[in-house]
Image: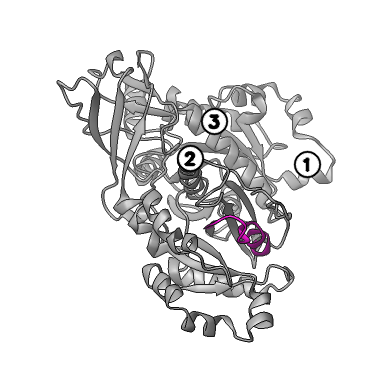
């Protein structure tokens, strides 16, 4: 669940964030000057849910110029990628000034009118209300026309916090229940104005990449006014040359289809049907249709019994694939399962054993090709699943055959995942020391991934324990590998190219 705290200065936003997370993450000390001058993200486990909270500077900051406030609010959305489930417009009870009245309007000016549907009012200092006025929050709302007017302009939902009683977790549970009603249980979130963003970029650097698998034009962007992390954009039209660099680029990013499934802050855009306006001296304008890149796709590869399905369950944090003990393969067909983790949607594909005794190699090849097709437009990573203490010559031959099947280009998208890490722990063996005893295994790992450090090319799982940290570290390696690959993925064309090479 992704929450963004917005509001004026000194209304208790940081304290509210600490109350939600049940721990001190944001600076909420008493001060004569505002302490929050930039957007900050914190996370925690709240009622068995992963909750991400972003604290922001005051909407009418006394220490930041308006353009910096705007940039920080936009960065808060980026920190909540793929989008916040709710904006908590924080208001101190008994302090409903003209600034508070303009808070929602200010937010709409920065993020667009769509933001109001995902905004609810969070009143702070609830302990003072009944003590000083003798009425509860519902009576307060009914008596104040300005508050009622504000509620009609947003989701209509409100909640009250007593930040002095952080141990009162029921107030947090009630808040999450209300957020669920706004977000449809987490299915809906803010994505920008109807899925359409206009982003300004300055000082683009464009260069032709002739060594790439196919000729592309790679453009490196500096941060734009929205500060999205569009670091590399692959443009498939080589007529975009260096003359683009000095100009201001107006990029319209149009997410087609159901906008609720699209990401307003995708890091990478694969440009399709791109058109550069000609005859424009001061700017170029073009539209880009983007796929849904909030979803990272993982394909598990390996022989029967190494723990592929269990690894998939560990990644997804649930029992998605059957992983019972068996002398023969449990997974006979490619299976697809998804789950959210750290604000991103991860899709995992469990594959049959390439050397499954009940199927011919031709049948299994066909099934794996189907799996790649299911991962359209392609998987971001292949996880070669192995048991570290059971690497045989047969395993080596099997991996070489799989490498041949997918082609040389697949190595850039491959990482080794060792299972049964618990066995290493029981014997007090470090994976680094174990790898030193097997030169063939080290050689296979060294050929994987575009990441330079050897330790980033593999990961170890203990499938026996539920440890989100081991998953988080794997995701970090995958994300860095995807970034190093320019956001690209292994495509059907690469697979077809490998098959043609095998036939020659």
Cβ–Cβ below 8 Å for labels 3 and 2? Answer: no
Mark 3 secondary-structure assignment: helix
Q: Secondary structure at mark 2?
A: loop
Q: Which residues are magenta?
A: 3-20
**Side of 11 where 196 appears, left or right:** left
- The crowding category of the residue bearing disc 3, from other C-alpha atoms within 10 Å (few below 14, some 14 to 19, many at least 20), is some
- Residue denoted by label 1: 424
- Spatial distance from mark 3 to mark 2, Cα to Cα? 10 Å
Location of mark 3 (residue): 399
Residue 170 horizontal side relative to residue 231, left or right: right
**497 or 304: nearer the viewer:** 497
**For residue 475, above or below residue 467:** above
Q: Alpha carbon of mark 2 to alpha carbon of mark 1: how far?
A: 27 Å
Q: Which of the 4 quarters of the picture holds residue 458?
A: top right
**Image point 43% across, 24% down: which residue?**
409
Determine whether, in the image, residue 372 is placed left or right of residue 398.
left
Sort mark 1 into few (<14), some (14-19) or many (20+) by Cα contacts within 10 Å. some
Q: Please tell me whether residue 285 is drawn above or below residue 357 in the rendered image.
A: above
For disc 2, the neighbor class at 10 Å (few under 14, some 14 to 19, many from 20) is many
Q: Earlier in the sequence, mark 1 or mark 3?
A: 3
Residue 221 spot, x, y in % from top left = 41, 26
Quadrant assignment for the N terminus:
bottom right
Please tell me which residue lies in front, 42 or 269. 42
The quadrant the C terminus occupies is top left
Front: mark 1 or 3: 1
Earlier-in-chain disc, 2 versus 1: 2
């Amino acid at each position: 669940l992704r929450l963004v705290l917005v509001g004026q200065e000194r209304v208790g936003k940081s304290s509210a964030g600490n109350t939600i997370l049940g721990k001190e993450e944001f600076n909420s000390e008493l001060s004569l000057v505002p302490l929050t001058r930039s957007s900050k993200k914190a996370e925690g486990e709240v009622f068995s849910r992963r909750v991400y909270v972003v604290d922001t500077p005051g909407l009418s900051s006394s220490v930041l110029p308006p353009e910096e406030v705007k940039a920080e609010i936009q960065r808060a959305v980026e920190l909540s990628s793929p989008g916040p489930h709710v904006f908590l417009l924080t208001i101190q009870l008994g302090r409903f000034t003209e600034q508070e009245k303009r808070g929602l309007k200010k937010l709409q000016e920065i993020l667009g009118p769509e933001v109001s549907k995902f905004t609810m009012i969070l009143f702070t200092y609830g302990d003072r209300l009944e003590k000083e006025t003798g009425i509860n929050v519902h009576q307060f709302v009914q008596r104040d026309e300005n508050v009622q007017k504000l509620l009609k302009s947003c989701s209509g939902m409100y909640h009250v916090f007593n930040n002095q009683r952080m141990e009162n977790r029921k107030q947090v549970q009630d808040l999450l229940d209300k957020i669920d009603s706004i977000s449809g249980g987490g299915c809906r979130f803010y994505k920008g104005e109807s899925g359409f963003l206009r982003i300004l970029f300055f000082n683009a650097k464009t260069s032709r990449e002739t060594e790439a698998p196919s000729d592309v034009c790679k453009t490196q962007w500096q941060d734009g006014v929205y500060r999205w992390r569009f670091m590399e954009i692959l443009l498939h039209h080589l007529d975009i040359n260096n003359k683009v660099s000095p100009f201001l680029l107006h990029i319209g990013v149009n997410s087609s289809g159901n906008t609720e499934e699209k990401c307003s802050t995708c890091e990478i855009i694969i440009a399709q049907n791109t058109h550069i306006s000609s005859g424009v001296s001061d700017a170029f304008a073009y539209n880009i249709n983007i796929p849904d890149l909030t979803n990272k796709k993982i394909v598990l590869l390996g022989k029967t019994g190494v723990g592929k399905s269990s690894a998939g369950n560990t990644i997804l944090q649930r029992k998605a694939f059957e992983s019972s003990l068996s002398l023969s393969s449990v997974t006979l067909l490619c299976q697809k399962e998804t789950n959210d983790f750290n604000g991103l949607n991860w899709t995992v594909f469990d594959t049959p054993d390439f050397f499954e005794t009940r199927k011919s190699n031709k049948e299994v090849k066909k099934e794996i090709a189907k799996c790649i097709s299911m991962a359209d437009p392609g998987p971001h990573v292949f996880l070669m699943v192995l048991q570290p203490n059971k690497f045989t010559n047969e395993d080596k031959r099997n991996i070489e055959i799989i490498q041949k099947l997918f082609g040389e280009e697949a190595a850039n998208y491959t990482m080794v995942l060792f299972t049964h890490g618990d066995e290493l722990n029981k014997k007090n063996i470090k994976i680094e020391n174990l790898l030193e005893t097997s030169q063939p295994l080290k050689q296979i790992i060294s050929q994987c991934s575009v990441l330079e450090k050897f330790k980033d090319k593999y990961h170890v799982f203990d499938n026996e324990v539920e440890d989100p940290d081991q998953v988080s570290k794997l995701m970090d390696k995958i994300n860095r590998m995807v970034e190093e690959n320019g956001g690209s993925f292994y495509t059907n064309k690469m697979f077809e190219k490998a098959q043609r090479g095998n036939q020659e």
